[in-house]
Amino acid sequence: MPIVQKVNSSTRKISYAYLFGIPLVTVFFSTNLNDPFNVPKQIILIVISSILLVEISLKYYLSPIKRKSPEFLIFLVISLFCGSQVITLLVADNASQSFFGETSRRNGLVTYLGLSILMIYGFRFFSNLNATLFYKMLLFTTIPVVVYGLVQITGNDFVEWNNPYNNAIATFGNPNFTSAFLAISFVACFVLLFIKSISFIIKLVAISLSVCSLVIILASQSRQGLYAIFVALVFYLNVKLYLQKSKLRVFVYFSSLLMALLSIFGMLQKGPFSSILYKDSVSVRGYYWRAGVEMFLNNPLTGVGLDQYGNFYRQFKELEYVNKFGYELTSTDAHNTFIQLFATSGAMAGISYLLLIFIVYLSGYRFLKKSANTNEQNIMLGLLSIFTAFQAQSFISISNLGISVWGWSIGGVIFGIFYYSDVINDDLHSKNNLQFARKSQVNLFKPIIQVFLLVPVMLLSIYVYRSESDMFLLRGIANPSFPNNKIAVQEYSNKVFLNPFSDLYLKIRSALYLGDMGLMEEGYSKMQALEKSYPDNYEVLWSLAIYEEKLGNIEKTINTRLKISEIDPYNTKNYLILLNLYKMQNNTVMMQNMVRRIITLNKDGQDAKDALEIAGKS
């Protein structure tokens, strides 16, 4: 018998904001913004999560959480996760970046609050009665992604992207993210073939999408999609055999473990799979992971600042990394969601996130053990497998909004399916006059509450959108070959700079564009203002030093570049510039000091050769 009794079909209706908002986060992009992918996705997430927050709050008003219920535990863990990030925001050097997230990443506090709301909503409004709806949402979201991906890999893209990668960027802006999402979709297409309540037509669509997804994943040249599929299908097969108590399960368990070990060795350039699995981009992740661990060990309570990994990477990177890849290559993310959270948000955020994942798997496992209905088991096992694909790519990749909305939402749906049998259905037990009165109040005030919350959210979104739009226009007109654009550049630069929600990187670029157009004093003034607000930011200091040198202020340039050397101690290019500056001052002692530093860091590098030549000519 099913563990959940059949209830009125009118219960747990899903909001349109959820049904269409999550797919929209994945597929939407705007070519009129400086960041055409992540910014519009974040804006959509902010809006839909605000709408859903009202739905959740009213639901809790009608049916408060019982303290001893499993629901309270989940709510508490999510609250700890969000609360720890709020604390991190309050002590962050760059509060704006911690709130919105790193440029071209957008994994700040507002994003994680939105994702947490999606998880809570899934828990409160999903059950095994409507779980297949989630499969259909994911399936039909995949259609436009696959169609656009095929258009791109066949060379027929209607957008001329300034793209350093291959063509398979789809709606994510990066082939790695395309590969990761399509891996999750492939797993969904595979597992729903075994769900009886899914129609034959939907299954045909799933088969077609799975084939197309594989084609695009291979064209993306990103191995993380294949890796995520492999991990998820191995998980599915092992659990399936366990539930069926098959005699083959011991053999499959052993084979899975062996394949996992060989795959790990292969990614480390060892064993028979090394030629297939090894990539330089895989090996470089080790440097990012170790730097993230060091950030956490040095700041265990609050981390270095939510989504501020890039601001501190130069201080924690290894000399071997610099000698191998050069000082220019850096990273804004640990390329591992778990390490990233520990490094940037501290122990409480990292532990609560791991605890959430554990509770998801525990809930799914307990449901599978309790349920005697094969179709219900297939629905749950499928969701757990999709969740596993999401976690597998999270282990080696950057968190991407278009993908994260599915991982967090699936977690909420799994909670909802399992705990639904333990939660008294609100609609069937709301017959007394007090609850009827509460429902009447909800129906009356719900639109007012939604408007009250959405107004500030929309204003915030408009400001963010304008800053990105203004920068997009500024980037197009800031060309020294067209001096007549000077006034327009000045106007848009001021718009970006004065926008309270402009990203720091956008403000830096807006100030540098002024210098490009010959407005040196105005640009320098803006950079000085940024330096006062962000005295330890590498990008700010580097840009300030450029201005100071162009204006002929050698002493200030030297002082600024000495600050840079504290933030980026392995930057031989910075020492080479300092060497030239000291040469202008005829300061032979400091010249020799710079030469020694450069040779100590990388004696065989081009900067060392240039340093010896400059010093030899002095």
Image (tube, rainbow, N blue to C red):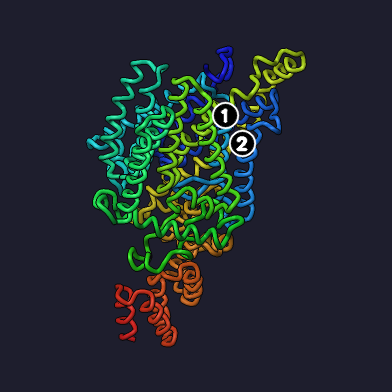
User: Of all residues shown, which one is farthest toward the right?
Assistant: 434
Amino acid type of the residue tagged 2 in the rendering: Ile
User: Looking at the picture, how far across and down is residue 21, in whole percent?
Assistant: 49, 29
Q: Which residue is mark 1?
A: 123
Quadrant assignment for the C terminus: bottom left
Q: Is residue 614 visible?
A: yes
User: Looking at the picture, how far across and down is residue 247, in whole percent?
Assistant: 36, 31
Q: Residue at x 36, y 27 (%)?
A: 189
Q: Which mark is residue 74?
A: 2
Assess whether mark 1 and mark 2 are in contact (beta carbons under 8 angstroms): yes
Q: Is residue 178 visible?
A: no
Q: Residue at x 50, y 20 (%)?
A: 130
Instruction: State the residue in front, 587 or 390.
Output: 390
Q: Secondary structure at mark 2?
A: helix
| Earlier sequence position, callout 2 versus callout 1 | 2
Left or right relative to 67: residue 36: left
Amino acid type of the residue tagged 1 in the rendering: Phe
User: Looking at the picture, how far across and down is residue 256, in whole percent?
Assistant: 35, 41
Residue 26 picture quarter: top left
Task: State whether residue 105 is above or below residue 537.
Answer: above
Tell me the crowding category of disc 1: few under 14, some 14 to 19, or many 20 or more residues within 10 angstroms, Cα based: many
User: Looking at the picture, how far across and down is residue 199, in whole percent?
Assistant: 37, 15
Q: Which mark is residue 75?
A: none
Q: Residue at x 44, y 41 (%)?
A: 391
Task: State whether residue 402 is above or below residue 197.
Answer: below
Task: State whether residue 91 is above or below residue 145.
Answer: below
Instruction: State the residue in front, 24 or 138.
Output: 138
Left or right relative to 486: residue 69: right
Q: Residue at x 58, y 53 (%)?
A: 346
Instruction: State the residue in front, 391 or 118.
Output: 391
Q: Secondary structure at mark 1?
A: helix
